[in-house]
Amino acid sequence: MLSPQPVARRKPRRRQVDRSAETRALLTRATAELLRETGFAGVTTGALHHHFATKDELLIAVLDENTERVREQLGREEHVTRRGEIDVTSLVAHLWEVYGDPGYWAIWEINIGTRADPALHRKVVEHRVWTMQQVLHPWITRHILSRDGKPTIIALFEFMLIAIRGLSLERFLDKEDAYFEQHLSLLADMVSRKLASLTAMP
């Protein structure tokens, strides 16, 4: 007796909105790679207009993707100990996964390359301010600050990010991994000590 043949199930068709979102994400990643490999001048508007109205919109999307990577790293549970303290060493290491990634060079290309276009450069600067206000500051408030807040603690974490981003430029000089590990360790130690002194203050 013949066994019944299995009925082939057709995969559900993906919605246009899903396909479009995936294409936008692919274009954003491809643009970041292009920026890293060829620089700001290498990004042309050619085939992008179907998914991005302008080149400016595409470049801001690259910044948006980087912001989301930072948000994800800040959200990792291991940054906060059981006693509710911040593990700065863990935090620095995970933020380095974003800023130390060779792909972060695309962000530097945008920051530097837009200087000749004041309107676009202003958007880039505004995006940076928005990221700090919408991603970093709420995280600090949730995990560290009292209701009164301490601007010095916000400044400390902004300094930490500035130092990490600045260290990423050293990748251009082909430094060894040990170089970055040493400096990230120094940074984590400095921030930990300062944070401890600030949070101990009445």
Image: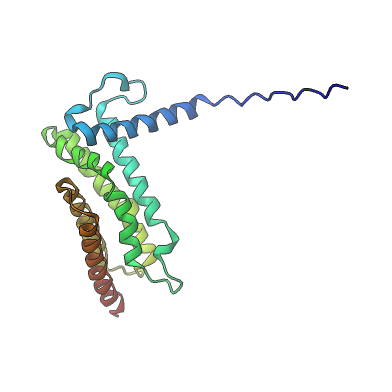
The quadrant in which residue 86 appears is: bottom left
Q: Is residue 9 left or right of residue 80?
A: right
The quadrant in which residue 56 appears is: top left
Q: Identify which residue is drawn at 25% across, 74% down.
A: 193
Q: Identify which residue is drawn at 61% across, 26% down.
A: 12
Q: Quadrant of the C terminus?
A: bottom left
* Residue 66 visible in the shown view: yes
Q: From the viewer's side, name the closer residue of 78 and 137.
A: 78
Q: What is the residue that sits farthest to the front in this orientation?
A: 1
Q: Quadrant of the N terminus?
A: top right
Residue 62 x, y percent position in the rendering? 30, 37
Task: Look at the picture and state if 50 lies above or below 22.
Answer: above
Residue 164 x, y percent position in the rendering? 23, 56
Q: From the viewer's side, name the closer residue of 21 and 188.
A: 188
Q: What is the residue that sits farthest to the right in this orientation?
A: 1
Residue 10 x, y percent position in the rendering? 65, 23
* Residue 155 visible in the shown view: no
Task: Look at the picture and state if 148 lies above or below 184.
Answer: below
Q: Identify which residue is drawn at 68% across, 25% down.
A: 9
Query: How many marks can you see?
Result: 0
Q: Is residue 95 left or right of residue 20?
A: left
Residue 33 x, y percent position in the rendering? 28, 34
Task: Look at the picture and state if 96 lies above or below 194.
Answer: above
The quadrant in which residue 184 appears is: bottom left
The image's colour scheme reads rainbow
Q: Identify which residue is drawn at 31% across, 49% down.
A: 98
